[in-house]
Each structure stands twice: as structure tokens, then as C-alpha cells.
Image: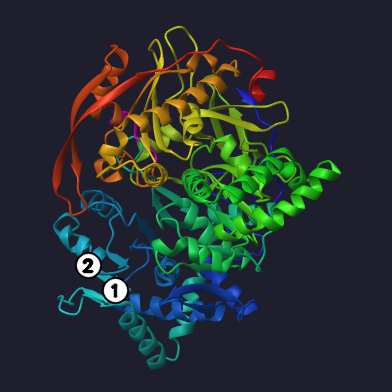
Amino acid sequence: MTEAVTAAAGRTGVPKDGGSERHVPGSSVSGDDTFPKLLLRNARLRGLRPAVRKKDLGIWQTWTWEDVRDEIRDFSLGLMELGFAPGDKLAIVGANRPRLYWAMVAAQSLGGVPVPVYADSVAEEMAFVLEHAEVRFAMVEDQEQVDKLLSIADQVPLLEEIVYDEARGLRDYDHSRLHAFETVSAAGRDHRFANANAEADWMARLGKGQGCDLAVILYTSGTTGRPKGVMLSYDNLIISSENANAFDHLDETEETLAYLPLAWIGDYVFSIAQSYTAGYCVNCPESTETVLDDRREIGPTYFFAPPRVFEGLLTLIMVRMEDAGRTKKKMFDFFMEVARRSGEAILNGEPASFKDRLLYRLGEFLIYGPMKNRMGFSRLKVGYTAGEAIGPEIFRFYRALGVNLKQLYGQTEASVYIAMQPDGEIYGDTVGKPAPQVEIKIADSGEILYRGPGTFLGYYKDEAATAGTKTEDGWVHAGDAGFFTEDGHIKIIDRAKDVGRLSDGALFAPKYLENKLKFFPNIKEAVAFGDGRDMACVFINIDLTSVGSWAERNNVNYASYQELAAHPQVYEMIESHVDQVNRDLAGEPLMAGAQIHRFLILHKELDADDGELTRTQKVRRSFISERYGPLIEALYDGSTRKHVVTEVTFEDGRKGAIEADVEIRDMTIYPARGEGIREAAE
């Protein structure tokens, strides 16, 4: 194996090799080694500073750290009155609401373990997680989630009590096992008023928690099968978060927006772990539909989003510009060329001509500033993207606008942070250097292995999976293939299991091809095939927003996604995008052999409810290969059209079928040329 350049270690109480499975209790910088202890510290030191905001009926409501402490204390005591005991699991189901976040820390205060669940999970998925985690209590958002839990009650016999945030629609339900958040909190307050020692006893119980204790169980999204419960300790989360805060100079003045799924490690770290360690304020939007407007109102200084969010924002920008007047469109194109030429250099503090600096300043006033304000990035100090690779072109677009966007490489099993991009060393084709206290090495197979303070304890009730992922000395198999560049940065090629070779030996990295295609606003999703075959081919999903706007401007009538996807002019548009990707690949020696020979536009959008995507919107390749086998076969047997019937799941759970004749097109393949992408020279 090839050793990485390892980031400097030395945090108090943490082994310098970063390989310890469990760290010494109290090893965080502050000495407060659990989130309930950090809550008390923040209430003591930052009592009147804002900790949480929630927009309700158009008005932002604010809770200080003292308010949050009181809310969590009373709800925690109320849970205890319901019978919640140390070691019990509390499922959290719903959108980003303060009370759901508070419930997690309330459970931890009693020695319990929160288990966030994806709110959009179908009943079968949710039943598996709740049964596997042995959940006794649940905190849910509203009637929809209550109904979902009641419908699977026979599959989750251990589930005893359900607490809900929003009471609307639940008045006539049987409340023998249903409880309003307010009712539970009121019971906690009554207990505190009736017992002089109640608060002291609560704090004593809270104080028994240690950094090595299990803090949370987060279930993976199930890309390759059943979800696995990742067990993370307080030390895992707190030390990793303190390192990340120091890395980007984050403090109590930061503002973030909590809008990602509660069950995702990214939201847990950014909205709880880093907030509690730094003391900054977390803002919860009014609804999923108002996230963009709410972000613009808050103006977060610290922001995270998966590539799909940045791709969607870029699509909206391009659609608006296509609808803009001729003068405005020409001005936009002119200043975007200035930004592409010099914007990133100016952001990095690198040399740029006086003329370009002057034009860029004018562009900031006329174009870049209003655009960043529209996206909610006017006050952004640092933004991150991760979860999957972002197209280099998309990444450079945002940085050219002056948005300090960085990439990081992380996993649930690492408490997020594996590699991070230091200031002044930000490249579109790498994910940075090993994060603080993290070691990385590359196996002979090309797979990335890592270990550090965030390394997970194991998979819940799955020793075999743990042993297959984590070695006895703490190294974790990341499952991704990559290598180090000469300057010590990590370059991710693809998932290790997905990287392959065409039959002629050419490298085939499907995610690399897919990200190039997804740079175009008209392409929402792509799935590439080619391992072991004689050529690369792709499925494409069009972006209904972008292509629908194009259709409106060009008087193209359509009644459904299926009809628009099959339109000849849409095929011509997508063909031009695929052709541009092939031209680009021809200039990249490592990937020139993987140019796209044939493509088709799928007759339906890939959907998590149909099993084609995970709940974090990642493509489930093996499932798609099985589900669309006839279409894949048609790509490789020379067919120009294929009739298919595909089963779909509607929003109300009913099943149906979509029939279509899918067109398949051939592409021009260009001879390899030039020196290509950055790693080719290394």
C-alpha cells in the first residue's frame, strides 16, 4: 500500500496515529465530551445568543441557547415520565424542525440513542430500520408520519410511544400511545416543579455520559442492499467537528440553514455536532418549497449541499438567462466570460490583470452580486459540497462568481470528514488533503483506506459487515478508488466496485462520464455502462424544468415527461451535449477510450420510490442494470429503437406501468489528442 501524507495530529487525548477505535473520554478541546454537556456549556457561556431559528407563517422565531436548554430539559424529563430509559432508541422522522433536533439531544441526556429515519422512506423501508434498531419511542413531524408508523405497527412490535410536533389532523386519533410534544414537555415541567431535586437529578444523569458512549445510529442509504446502522460515538462526532471548525475558522457567529434529510450524516454534523461545538445558529426553513427564499433571507455564512443542489441552482440560472432580454443576455455572457477568465484567480488571491480586476468589480455590481444574492450566498464564508463528485465545470462556475465553494470527501463511517480542501489549494478535480488527524492510504487495488478520530464504532448488530469494512487496527475500506497527486491531494476516480475496463483495456469510470453530462442544465441524471464491454453507452434523464422552459420558448407542445423526452428536437439537443462530452474526453488520455458510443433518453425519471435511486438521490446501478436489462441489451446489439414496459409507483402507493418506444442514437468518436486532465501529467 502507498502511504498518504498525514495531517498533523496532537489534539489533547487523541492518539497521534489517529487509529484508536475509541478515544479517551473527555478528549474534546473543551472537556465537554457529549452533546448534552455542550448544551449546558453553550447555555452558560452563550446563553442569550441565537441557537435555533424556525420560520413559521412567514415569521422567523428565535430560541437562544438558554431557551434550547430549557426546551430540551423539560422534554427530556417528559420522556422519562413516559418510561424512556438509558439505552432506549428514539426514532426521529420528519423535516428539519427545532423540536426534532431537540428530541435527539433530549434522548441523549437520558442515556438513550437517537435514530433519525429518512422521512420519505416508504413503509417497508421504515419498518426495517425501526425493527432492526429496536426502537421503543418515536418523535415525528406530523400526521403523515404518524399514519406511516401506525400502518407498520405490526412489523415493529417494540414501538410503544409516538410523540408528534404538529397536531393538525390528529384530534380524533386514539391518543393512548400518541402524545403531543407540548404535552410531554408539560409533564416534564410538572415533574420538575413537583420534585425539588428533579433538575439536579437530570443534570447528574446527563453528566454520566462519556465521549466513548454511543451517540447516534445513522442508517446508510442502501445503495447496494439493506441499510446498515452506523454507530458513532460522541468522540467520533465532537472531535471531528472541532477539527472542522478550526480548519475553516468557524465560530459562534456563523449562520447555517438546516434543510437536508435528518437521517443523513451531513445534516447531523452540520446542524448538531458543529453547531454545538462552535455555538453557531441553525436556521430551519418554513418548508421544503421555501428553502431558496429562506436561504436568501438568512444569508448563511456556512453552507453545505450535495452536487445535485448546485446543479439545480445552475439550471435555474441558465433557464432565467434564456428567458431574459437580448441586452441582459449579452451582458450576462460578457461578464461570465470575465469571471471564467479571472474570477477564481481573484478569489484565491492570485495575480490578475488590472483590466480584468476592474471588469470583475463591475461584474460584481451588475451580475455576480445580484446572482449570489438570489441564491442566498451573499454572506457566504465557506460552502461545501460532497456526497458524490461534482462536475469540475460546475465547481469552477461558482468559484468564478466569488463563492468560496470547496469539496470534501467524507462518509457516514468517518463522521463525514476524510479529506478537505485547504484555503489556497482548491482544485476542481480533487477533494483535498487528509482532514486533520486523518490518515489515508491507497491499496494496491486503488481503493482508499482511512482511519482517524471519526472512524465509526461498527455497524449495529452486524459484526460480519463491520469486519468486512473495518480492519482490526482501525483502517476503513472506503469503497472508492483514487490516488494521490504530486501535491498530496486526493483524486477520486469512482466507486472502487464501479471502476472497470472496456474490452480493449481502456479505463471506464462511469461517474466521471455522468458528471460531465450533468454539467449541462438539460441533463438531470445519467447512468453509464461499459465495464467488460466493447464501448461506453449511457441512459439519460432530461431535466424537466430546464427542457420544459426550452419547450415553452420554442412552442414545443407536450403533455408529460415521457412525451417531452421522446421529442426529436430534445434528442437533437441532448445529442449535442453528448457530442461535446466526447470532444472533451478526446483531450483526456486517461479517459479518451471511454467516449460515449450510443445513448438513449429514458422514458421516465429515475425515482427513489421505484428503487432506482437511494433516499440521498444516488443511482443504484445494480438495480437499474436489472430493471432496464432490455434497454441495455438494445444499446449493445445495434438496435435503433426498443419497446419497453416499466412498472412505476405513484405517490399514493398504487402501482402502474409506463409503455414507450425508446429511441437509441449513435455518436461520433474522436481520436485522442493533447495532454488532458491534470493527473495525466503526474
Q: Nearer the viewer, residue 660 or 435?
A: 660
Residue at 40 percent across and 51 percent down: it is 218
Instruction: Using the numbered discs, state the Cα–Cα distance from disc 1 to disc 2 in whole angstroms.
Output: 10 Å
Residue 210 lies, in percent from the top left, at: 52, 62
Quadrant in the picture for the C terminus: top right
| Circle number at residue 160 | 2
User: In the shown orientation, is residue 398 left or right of residue 198?
Assistant: right
Q: Can residue 258 be seen in the rendering of this structure?
A: no
x, y percent for residue 5: 70, 33
- The quadrant of the image that shows the N terminus is top right
Q: Position of residue 133 (x, y in %)?
A: 31, 53
Q: In the rendered structure, are the residues bearing label 1 and label 2 in contact, judged by CB atoms less than 8 Å apart?
A: yes
The amino acid pointed to by label 1 is Gly
Q: Residues within 10 Å of mark 1 (few under 14, many from 20)?
A: some
Where residue 83 is drawn, which disc sits there?
1
Name the residue at 37% across, 58% down: 116
- Does residue 417 sit above or below 533 in this rendering? below
Colouring of the image = rainbow
In the rendered image, the residue lying farthest to the right is: 354
Residue at 51% over, 31% down: 516
Question: Which segment is the magenta one?
Answer: 618-623
| Residue 225 painted magenta | no
